[in-house]
Image: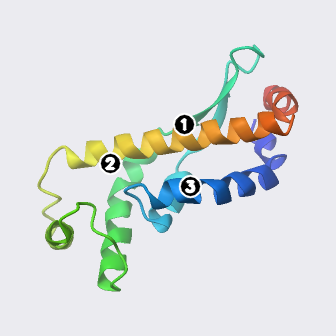
Amino acid sequence: MADWTDSIVGDRMTVDREFNDRVENSRFTSQEWGLIMTATELEIEHADDPERARIVADTEKLPQIMPELDNVRSQMAQMGGAPGEDSDSGAGIVDSLKGALGLGNGTGGNDQERLDAAERLTQAYADALQDHLESKNKWEQVRIAYQE
């Protein structure tokens, strides 16, 4: 089933470019987004039913990479390039310091909120990819390739 994605590499590049604004307006940096997408697999749900088939983001591996997102943000902060996750930029520095000391983010729900945000954004990407494939009349061909 992985072969189906090989046939849409160019389409994914187009959607990636179009989706950049969405990522820029999210809580994630482009480096974090790259890591999130590396841990996300795209699948076609109900591939055998043309009416119900849709691309879905399998985010099962995302919880495993959440600590690495902290490392990416911390490294960017050290270089002076990471935006704070909160509108109060001081909170980002405090979170970075707590992370460096191994104290976590101290908010309890923040990891779950960030995971939820990543899951919503990856599904929005999957939806955008399907919309693109449909607009280029490639969706049916891709759906059938997924089944093979």
Which residue is at 52% across, 44% downward? 122
Q: Is residue 17 above or below residue 63?
A: below
Residue 64 x %, y %: 39, 50
Counting from the top left corner in percent of width and height, residue 62 is at: 43, 46
Frontmost of labels 2 and 3 is 2
Indicate the quadrant containing the N terminus: top left, top right, bottom left or bottom right.
top right
Q: Nearer the viewer, mark 1 or mark 2?
A: 2
N-terminal-most mark, 3 or 1: 3
Q: Earlier in the sequence, mark 2 or mark 3?
A: 3
Q: Amino acid at mark 2?
A: Arg
Q: Which residue is mark 2?
A: 114
- Say whether residue 34 is left or right of residue 78: right
In-front residue for pair 51/24: 24
> Between marks 1 and 2, how big is the CA–CA gap?
16 Å
**Residue at horizontal 80%, vertical 25%?**
147
> Could you tell me the amino acid type at mark 3?
Thr
